[in-house]
Amino acid sequence: MVLDSQRDRADRILIPVARALRNVSPNALSWIAFLAAAFAGIAFYVGGGIFLGLAVAFLFINALLDALDGKVAKLTGKASPRGDFLDHVLDRYADVFMLTGIALSIPPYVPYGLGLLAILGVLLTSYMGTQAQAVGVGRHYGGALGRADRLVILAIAGILQAWFDPAGIAPFGVGGISFTWLGWTMAVFAVLGNLTAIQRGISAWRRLT
């Protein structure tokens, strides 16, 4: 996880914002983040320059609020198992909404099969992390591609897609393999997502033995 090592720097920005939001319920922030992801998925599905721009904007809102809900909960003493559970459930639905919007987009940015592999990789990555906690070896956030990394990559890909090829008619590549900007992003998620799931599974297995 590339961005995991930058948490201290991010906290310098997030903690003052969290203090400003201390009167807002952390669960409300989680729900708003989820709604932003749902709107991002719809915008990705419709496609085109304007909607891709909206998708990136909603994605940014989701990422920001997802980073803040936990900070607000800790600062206000409202952290709880229920809040943690709600946050993780909504994060998974958020991932599915956004990636499904891309996989089924009206301008065909991504082949259906590739989109499915990307969704599976993302869900299995999260499953392995929480399953490690369920069997008593602690929640696992390691591996090649974490959620923060995915959101940053997806935002950049959305911007590039909107700028260079909003209609999805100019795929590029080498060796007979070509995808759009969003297509290559889903390919990365499919490969590194499943690799991350395997890494977390092996790590948990070793801890159990």
Image: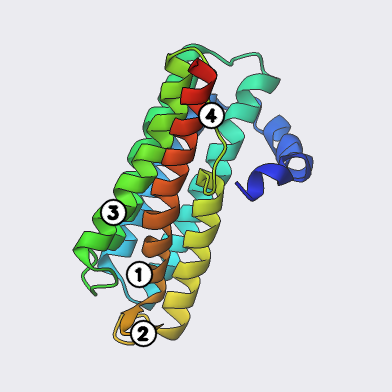
Tell me whether circle 1 and circle 3 mark residues in contact (CB < 8 Å): no
Q: State the separation of the CA atoms marked 1 and 3.
A: 12 Å
Q: Earlier in the sequence, mark 3 or mark 4?
A: 3
The part of the image, by quadrant, that contains residue 67 is top right
Packing grade of label 4 (10 A; few <14, some 14-19, many >=20) is: many
Write down the residue under mark 4.
Answer: 140
Residue beneath the point at 48% across and 46% down = 62
Which circle, 2 or 4, is nearer the viewer? 2
Q: Earlier in the sequence, mark 1 or mark 4?
A: 4
Q: Earlier in the sequence, mark 3 or mark 2?
A: 3
Q: State the separation of the CA atoms marked 3 and 2.
A: 21 Å
Q: State the separation of the CA atoms marked 2 and 4.
A: 37 Å
Q: Report the front residue among 128 and 91.
A: 128
Q: Is residue 174 above or below residue 184?
A: below
Packing grade of label 3 (10 A; few <14, some 14-19, many >=20) is: some
The part of the image, by quadrant, that contains residue 114 is bottom left
Tell me whether circle 3 and circle 2 mark residues in contact (CB < 8 Å): no
**Which mark is on residue 175?**
2
Write down the residue under mark 1.
Answer: 183
**Which mark is on residue 117?**
3
Q: Amino acid at mark 1?
A: Gly
